[in-house]
Image (cartoon, rainbow, N blue to C red):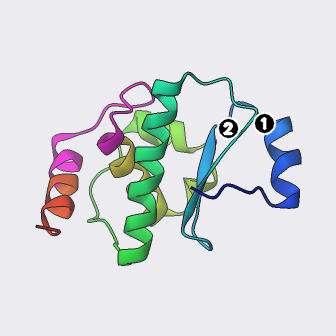
Amino acid sequence: MRPKLFPGEIEYFKKNPNTPGYADFESDSIVLNPFSTLPAEQLTFLVDNESLRLKMNKDKFVPPDFKITQEQKEFFEKTPYKDNPVAMRQTILARSYSGDNESMKYTPEQKQALKEYLSKDK
């Protein structure tokens, strides 16, 4: 967790209280939005999600080319990941890992890709 916000982040987070935080790959840390109204339980999901994304970035992990469902395509259409298939797949795996079942459903192939990635650490 990065405790100090950079100058532009405070303004961004004030304007975007629905963005609870993100993974900062440059500092290898998670940045939480101090203006977020998410309950603590949902923030733990965010921390789990972003922690795995930081790990994937550090590992230079490129997920397998699993299929993206129509529902997932529609979800990512509104995000910066819509034209970044590696980041999109990493995010799908990280959201699955954190238990984020609200935003999308995961295919057996995606769950298997996550399982295989996590088992490489053992």
Q: Which residue is mark 2?
A: 19
Looking at the rendering, in which quadrant would you find the N terminus?
A: bottom right
Which three-letter amino acid code belongs to the residue tagged 2? Thr
Which three-letter amino acid code belongs to the residue tagged 1? Asn
Residue 86 pos. (x, y %): 43, 65
Q: Secondary structure at mark 2?
A: loop
Q: Are marks 2 and 1 in contact (CB under 8 Å)?
A: yes
Residue 113 pos. (x, y %): 20, 56
Magenta region: which residues?
Answer: 96-112
In percent of the image, x 60 and y 24: which residue is there? 38
Q: Is residue 107 magenta?
A: yes
Q: Quadrant of residue 118?
A: bottom left
Query: Local crowd at mark 2 within 10 Å, few (<14), some, or many (≥20)?
Result: some
Looking at the rendering, in which quadrant would you find the C terminus?
A: bottom left
Q: Secondary structure at mark 1?
A: loop
Q: Report the side of 35 relative to 72 (left or right).
A: right
Residue 35 pos. (x, y %): 76, 32
In percent of the image, x 20 and y 46: which residue is there? 111
In percent of the image, x 58 and y 44: which residue is there? 77
Q: Which residue is mark 1?
A: 16
